Image: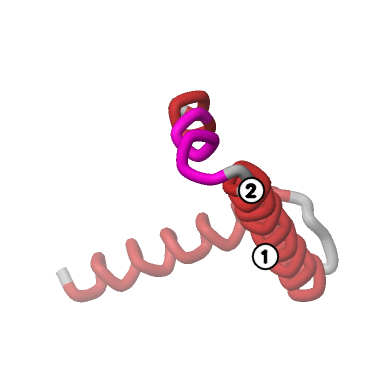
């Protein structure tokens, strides 16, 4: 499919493939920046990027929800 887009762009205009390449590069750059900000916020909040901290949050939330259901039940 990528080759089809490339050859279609080549037939329409001479400079089009470069615009497509810049668009893809911009998408990748934005994705990396968003991922970097996301990971920075996680590290700031939990002082680590260790997944065990996040798993303990999930487990504690699950336990609290289970206890509240048992009390209501």
The front one of 16 and 71 is 16
Label 1 Cα neighbours within 10 Å, binned few <14 / some 14-19 / many ≥20: few
In the rendered structure, the answer to whether residue 61 lies left or right of residue 46 reads left
Could you tell me which residue is drawn at 68 percent across and 53 percent down?
A: 22
Marks 2,1: beta carbons within 8 A: no
Pointer 2: what residue?
15
Residue found at the very far left of the displayed protein: 73
Q: Nearer the viewer, residue 47 or 62?
A: 47
Rendered-image quadrant of the N terminus: top left
Q: Is residue 32 left or right of residue 69?
A: right
**Where in the figure is residue 38, as x and y percent of width and height?**
68, 66
Q: Report if residue 8 lies within the magenta region.
A: yes
Secondary structure of the magenta portion, mostly? helix
Which residue is denoted by mark 1 in the rendering? Answer: 34
Residue 40 on the magenta segment: no
Which residue is depicted at the point 84% across and 68% down? 47
Q: Give the colour scheme shown.
A: secondary structure
Q: In the image, which residues are magenta?
A: 7-13
Give the residue drawn at x 24%, y 68%: 69
Secondary structure of the residue carrying numbered label 1: helix
Helix, strand or loop under label 2: loop
Q: Nearer the viewer, residue 50 or 5?
A: 5
Instruction: Identify the residue shown where x is 67% and y is 62%.
Output: 30
User: Residue 6's mark?
Assistant: none
- Mark 2, mark 1: which one is toward the viewer? 2
Instruction: Return the x and y of residue 13 as percentages of the image width and height.
Output: 53, 45
Question: Farthest residue in the right direction?
Answer: 47
């Amino acid at each position: 499919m990528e080759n089809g887009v490339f050859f279609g762009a080549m037939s329409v205009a001479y400079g089009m493939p470069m615009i497509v390449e810049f668009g893809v590069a911009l998408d990748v750059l934005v994705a990396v920046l968003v991922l970097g900000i996301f990971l920075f916020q996680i590290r700031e909040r939990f002082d680590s990027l260790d997944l065990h901290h996040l798993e303990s949050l999930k487990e504690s939330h699950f336990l609290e929800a289970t206890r509240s259901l048992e009390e209501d039940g």
